[in-house]
Image: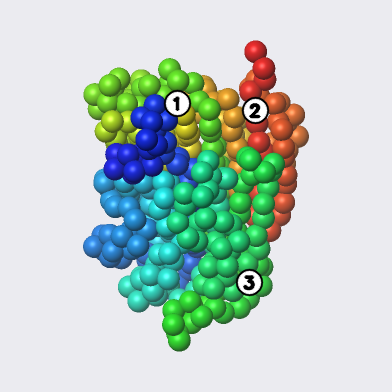
Amino acid sequence: MAETEILSNASENNSDQFFEGVEKLIEIWFTPAKNADLRRIPRQQWEKVLKIVRCEIISFTQSEQVDAYVLSESSMFVSKRRFILKTCGTTTPLRCVRAVLALARDVAGHERVHNVFYSRREFARPKAQLQPHDNFDSEVELLDSYFGDGRAYIMGPEKDCWYLYTLLPLEGTVDALEKEQIQVNCCESSEPDQTIEILMSDLDPAVMDIFSRASSATAAEATKASGIDKIIPGMVIDDFLFDPCGYSMNGVAKDGCYMTIHITPERACSYVSFESNVPAASYDDLIKRVLDAFRPAKFVLTVFASPDSPGADTPRQLKKISSLFAFEQKDAQFVRFAGYALHYALYCKFPS
């Protein structure tokens, strides 16, 4: 998160400095097509897209299967047929969807959208967001204008709810690119896929202090001191430490797996997000490493898994857990849709 963004969100009282760490996550899957590849889209074109979003590229790394960009506000991942954009602050990621669909068609050769996922946790200060992100109804309306009638979910209690939009499991077309149409088909077969996201708030101040220039001279120093480098061993890490505080990292592996972490360390609004598509039959050990590293008082956990992925049974396993590593499960929901199982849960630390 850029220093200018932090300062622009600060109140007149410097002790109440605020930054919206909660991210908006848009993920678009395209149907496989001969010679089609989103990685053919040049960086200059992505930079134009990100201007619409109100952020910019800071750093870049890649594996054989995924291009990973650290942004001034979080991250972007581009693989052969999947586009992921995750941005915090007052960014406007849904405004760029039309441009992404045009590039996917005209440059990358992708004519069909296979599925779409848009999600976010409830903002700390929703009134500070720009349209359409000032309310979920407006976000859904804009997404439907691109993709047709989607399915919208609101999970969890009001102050800690998690919003999700995905496509209906029906074939159809949408007028997403002026008079030309891009087809939507989320019934076709897909590759195995699973994603875990841990969205943490009210974090240990001692841990958060690591992610400031006053405590860490470099991003690498913060990565090692916090134990981030040990969460998923074998990842090639691209990290960035903001000035005066804040941290972002992407990790990529040869097999196409990624992880990404973003940290807003200010005590009045501490927030950390963790996300990865690493395959696992059980996420218990990974969750423990993440919680041990950041020590939150509260977190939202979501797990998506397709039926043919290694983690196909993981959502059901998580559903059966009544407590997790000294945390009490306050809310949990399990749903199936469009070839995926989804588990959502809210955890709060047991009173001392």
Please name the residue that numbered disc 2 is placed on.
Answer: 348
Circle 3 sits in a helix, a strand or a loop, which is it?
loop
Tell me if 327 is positioned left or right of 111 in this view: right
**Amino acid at the residue labelled 3:** Asp
**Amino acid at the residue labelled 1:** Arg
* CB within 8 Å, label 1 to label 2: no
Tell me if 122 is positioned left or right of 110 in this view: right
Circle 1 sits in a helix, a strand or a loop, which is it?
helix
Tell me if 84 is positioned left or right of 223 in this view: right
Vertical side of 60 occupied by 143: above or below:
below
- Most distant residue in the front direction: 12
Q: CA distance from mark 1 to mark 3?
A: 40 Å
- Please tell me which residue lies in front, 316 or 215: 215
Q: Residue at x 69, y 36 (%)?
A: 318
Q: CA distance from mark 2 to mark 3?
A: 35 Å
Q: Residue at x 44, y 82 (%)?
A: 178
Please name the residue that numbered disc 1 is placed on.
Answer: 267
Residue 187 visible in the snapshot: no
- Please tell me which residue lies in front, 13 or 161: 13
Q: CA distance from mark 1 to mark 2?
A: 18 Å
